[in-house]
Image (cartoon, rainbow, N blue to C red):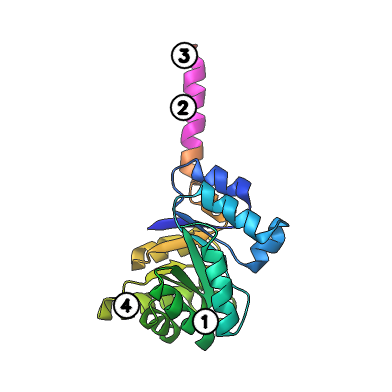
Amino acid sequence: MKFFLDTADINDIREANATGLLDGVTTNPSLIKQAGRDFFEVIAEIAAEVDGPVSAETTAHDHETMMKEGLKCAEIASNIAVKVPLTVDGLKTCKALRERDIMVNVTLCFSANQALLAAKAGATFISPFVGRHDDVGFNGMELIEDIRLVYDNYGFDTQILVASVRHPAHVLESARIGADVATMPWGAMRKLFNHPLTDSGLKGFDKDWAATGFSIL
């Protein structure tokens, strides 16, 4: 499974990238607002920092304007994935951008039917929002299972990019199901490192090492 960071915070991206675990970055208008920086400046900086895909989201709702925005975003760097919503106009834009060999991330997916439409439109990535799905009483993991089954049935190349990840269980279950990517904030990714037995083991080693009186340096 690939790990993307869901943020526009360049410091978090650099810290995660230093681990060698980061495969890409996703952003959205809300994350750009949180960053408090110029959209093009921050996307260009992220794209230069990360080798993998960097999602830059369009804001228009109509196909014509969305297409113009998508082409402008794609000019920022060669690893930009233009992010469009799962609407009729969004999928029109997806198809048109893919015909130009531009990566497209179709976002705000909440059903397997929607994911099927995005795959047929040629989406590079589909972003089902599992956390938001859970918030309204549905099971986000069942959505990932359904999408995986449908895509495998027909051999679609669209990658399942699990979004709105809230906790490590979302990542584990997505990996079990066979999702291609999980995107999450750095805080959520850091939780994947945590285990109480790791912490207690380190404390035991530290205590025993101190008792030896030795020093490696």
Q: How far apart are marks 3 and 2 (CA)?
A: 11 Å
Dot 4, crowdedness within 10 Å: few (<14), some or many (≥20)? some
Q: What stretch is highlighted in magenta?
A: 200-212
As rendered, which of 124 and 209 lies closer to the eye? 124
Q: Does the magenta stretch include residue 132?
A: no
Residue drawn at point x = 30 percent, y = 76 percent: 156
Query: Is 154 drawn above or below residue 163 in the view shown?
Result: below
Asked if labels 1 and 3 touch by Cβ distance under 8 angstroms, the answer is no
The kind of secondary structure element at disc 1 is helix
As rendered, which of 89 and 99 lies closer to the eye? 99
Asked if labels 4 and 3 touch by Cβ distance under 8 angstroms, the answer is no
Q: How far apart are marks 3 and 4 (CA)?
A: 57 Å
Amino acid at dot 1:
Gly
The kind of secondary structure element at disc 3 is helix
Q: How far apart are marks 2 and 4 (CA)?
A: 47 Å
Can the viewer see residue 105 in this picture? yes
Q: Which disc number belongs to residue 205? A: 2
Asked if labels 4 and 2 touch by Cβ distance under 8 angstroms, the answer is no
Dot 1, crowdedness within 10 Å: few (<14), some or many (≥20)? many
Q: How far apart are marks 2 and 1 (CA)?
A: 55 Å
Q: Quick one: label 2 or label 4, which is nearer the N terminus?
A: 4
Q: Position of residue 172 (x, y in %)?
A: 42, 60
Q: Which disc number belongs to residue 90? A: 1
Q: Which disc number belongs to residue 212? A: 3
Which label lies toward us, 3 or 4?
4
Find the residue positioned furthest to the top.
213
Q: Quick one: label 3 or label 4, which is nearer the N terminus?
A: 4
Q: Quick one: label 4 or label 1, which is nearer the N terminus?
A: 1
Which label lies toward us, 4 or 1?
1
Which label lies toward us, 2 or 4?
4
For disc 4, the marked residue is 151
